[in-house]
Amino acid sequence: MAVSWFFWFFYSLGSGNLRRHYLFRKRDFRGIFEQGKFYLISIFRGEENPFRPTPEEKFNPLQKLAYGTIM
């Protein structure tokens, strides 16, 4: 598992995926609460997700936190 992690880490670092998809930015800290509110309350009211994925920004702030923690 450690070998797999090193492969993922160095590949992501070299390809720019680590910086592009997993690095937390200032807006992500604000977005954590907004996304958390969506998953706890707004999703049941049928409201729209505040996060819009783009090619540059694939994951919402909670996904970045979860994937970064797991990896």
Image (cartoon, rainbow, N blue to C red):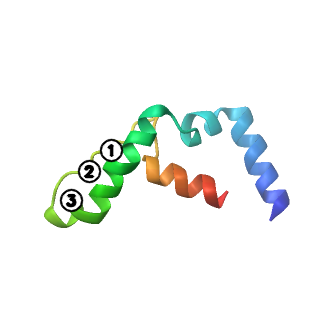
Residue at the right extreme?
Answer: 3
Q: Position of residue 25 (x, y in %)?
A: 50, 34
Q: In this view, does 17 lie to the left or right of 47?
A: right
Q: Residue at x 58, y 38 (%)?
A: 23
Residue under label 1: 51
Q: Quarter-wise, where is residue 31 in the image?
A: top left
Viewer-proximal residue, 55 or 44? Answer: 44
Q: Position of residue 66 (x, y in %)?
A: 54, 58
Measured Cα–Cα span from mark 2 to mark 3: 8 Å
Using the image, tell me which numbered label, if any, was put on residue 14: none
Q: Quarter-wise, where is residue 30 in the image?
A: top left
Q: Where is residue 70 in the image (x, y as percent from the top left)?
A: 63, 61
Position of residue 47 relative to residue 9, above or below, is below
Q: How crowded is mark 3: few (under 14 residues within 10 Å), some or many (20 or more)?
A: some
Residue under label 3: 42
Q: What residue type is labelled 1?
A: Phe
Residue under label 2: 49
Measured Cα–Cα span from mark 3 to mark 1: 13 Å
The mark closer to the camera, 3 or 1, is 3
Q: Is residue 37 left or right of residue 18?
A: left
Viewer-proximal residue, 51 or 42? Answer: 42
The secondary structure type at the circle numbered 3 is: helix
Residue 56 makes an appearance in the image: no
Q: Residue at x 83, y 61 (%)?
A: 2
The secondary structure type at the circle numbered 2 is: loop
